[in-house]
Amino acid sequence: MKRRYLYVLLFGVPTFLASVIISLLLFGAVAGALWLFVLGDNPWASTVSSMLVAMLILVCMTLWVAFMSVAYVAGKKQEAHAAMSTKHVVASAGATALLVALVVSHQWSVGNIGTKSDGLLCSEYCRNKGFVGSGMQPRNTGAATCSCFDAQGREAAKVPMGDVTAEQRK
């Protein structure tokens, strides 16, 4: 197999991860700018959402093709050498590991993976009991209680966090 194609395969995963991360960051920036300066808090038209998703996919694929073309050119330049460069294999593995670690650390910090916060446990508890909203006492009060609110915003139930966590474990 020619080295140019091998480099495309070797750098396929890290370039895809990088293009997804960059395009999601750009998507967030564009959506934020539209929200702040153009469309505001009113409901957006469905065409805007569809166009944003289409643009996200288009930008992601364009970035991936651009990154893969760089890998192709680098592989083409390496065809003159007899042996495969171990630095490039390590760079590909390292870039993949770094990008995966970046995604995992972000998801951990926002609470999508790992242990759930008391606020999230309280929210799930109240929602499962049929309440509309939930709230926690401020941390500096020392009272670890979960408050559940009805449709009028009145406190309908107050439960110690020990009971909430015990029920969540069931």
Image (tube, grey):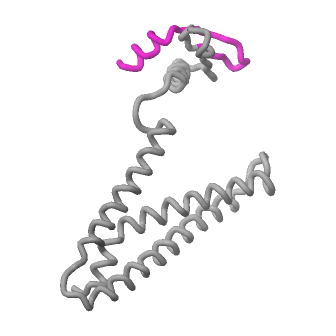
Determine whether, in the image, residue 124 is placed left or right of residue 95.
right
Query: 145 or 81: which is nearer to us?
Result: 81
Q: Compared with residue 107, is residue 62 higher up or lower down, i.e. above or below?
A: below
Q: Residue at (41%, 57%) from the top-left corner?
A: 99
Could you tell me which quadrant the N terminus lies in? bottom left
Residue 126 shown in magenta: no
Q: Residue at (43%, 44%) from the top-left corner?
A: 105
Residue 21 placement (x, y as % from top left): 50, 59
Query: 106 or 163: which is nearer to us?
Result: 106
Q: Compared with residue 80, is residue 156 higher up or lower down, i.e. above or below?
A: above
Q: Compared with residue 24, is residue 129 higher up or lower down, i.e. above or below?
A: above
Residue 113 placement (x, y as % from top left): 42, 38
Q: Residue at (56%, 20%) from the top-left corner?
A: 130
Q: In which quarter of the image is residue 9?
A: bottom left
Q: Compared with residue 50, is residue 105 higher up or lower down, i.e. above or below?
A: above
**Residue most toward the left?**
83
Determine whether, in the image, residue 15 is placed left or right of residue 7.
right
Residue 85 placement (x, y as % from top left): 25, 77
- Residues in magenta, as a range: 147-170
Query: 57 or 137: which is nearer to us?
Result: 137
Residue 164 shown in magenta: yes
Q: Residue at (56%, 70%) from the top-left corner?
A: 59
